[in-house]
């Protein structure tokens, strides 16, 4: 075959291959491998935990205790997701579940801002203890978040 035909043919094959969608056109083992690579890591989940942390604070401040309780439950679920997604964080995450979460649960259950406030400070410390143990001590959190993202709380941007 002449090179003048071979080169465009190879190019065409290359382009076709790039466009092939692995989700539909590859072996299940390759699909699984790609899916495992796509499992979001700690920082992804932490971003959401950070938002819920702020929402928790402001929900309590507004006396919206059920919404505050909901935030605590979602934070716990997300910490469990981190345990599964990143096994090297599993042990410190477990410590947080056992020693960090009970105080804030009690604080929310009290439905009283004066009891909630010190419980939130304890939560803040528990979050940052885990950051320290995972070589991210520079990620610090405010004990009095200035804003919260949930439209439920309707705070200014
Ligand atoms: C299992 C230990 C652990 C616990 C518990 C934990 N964190 Fe984190 N967090 C990390 C690690 C590790 C990172 C850095 C991300 C990475 O290495 O991928 C991080 C990062 C963050 C970030 C930065 C996200 C970004 O990329 O901008 C925020 C915000 C955050 N955590 C909030 C919290 C809050 C709030 C709590 C407590 C309610 C908490 N974290 C509890 C381990 C933890």
Image: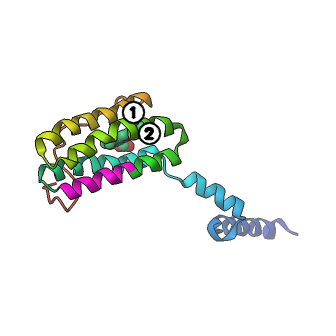
Please tell me which residue lies in front, 78 or 24: 78
Please tell me which residue lies in front, 71 or 138: 71
Q: Is residue 139 visible?
A: no
State whether the magenta stretch is mostly helix, strand or loop.
helix
Say the numbered circle drawn on residue 130: 1
Boundaries of the magenta span: 65-76
Q: Position of residue 144 (x, y in %)?
A: 17, 39
The quadrant in which the N terminus is found is bottom right
Q: Quadrant of residue 31?
A: bottom right
Q: Quadrant of residue 122?
A: top left
**Helix, strand or loop at disc 1?**
helix
Q: Could you tell me which residue is drawn at 79 percent across and 68 percent down?
A: 4
Local crowd size for mark 1, using a 10 Å CA cut-off: few (<14), some (14–19), many (≥20): some
Which residue is disc 2 drawn over? 93
Where on the image, by quarter, is ligand 1?
A: top left
Q: Is residue 126 above or below residue 58?
A: above
Please tell me which residue lies in front, 7 or 10: 10
The quadrant in which the C terminus is found is bottom left
């Amino acid at each position: 075959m002449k090179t003048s035909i071979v080169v465009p043919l190879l190019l065409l094959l290359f382009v076709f291959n790039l466009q092939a969608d692995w989700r539909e056109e590859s072996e299940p083992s390759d699909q699984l491998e790609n899916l495992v690579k796509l499992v979001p890591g700690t920082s992804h989940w932490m971003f959401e935990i950070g938002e819920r942390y702020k929402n928790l604070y402001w929900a309590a401040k507004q006396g919206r205790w059920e919404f505050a309780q909901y935030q605590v439950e979602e934070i716990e679920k997300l910490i469990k997701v981190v345990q599964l997604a990143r096994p090297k964080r599993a042990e410190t995450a477990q410590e947080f579940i056992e020693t960090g979460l009970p105080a804030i649960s009690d604080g929310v259950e009290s439905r009283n801002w004066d009891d909630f406030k010190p419980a939130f400070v304890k939560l803040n410390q528990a979050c940052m203890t885990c950051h320290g143990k995972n070589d991210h001590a520079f990620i610090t959190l405010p004990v009095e978040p200035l804003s919260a993202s949930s439209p439920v709380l309707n705070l200014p941007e």
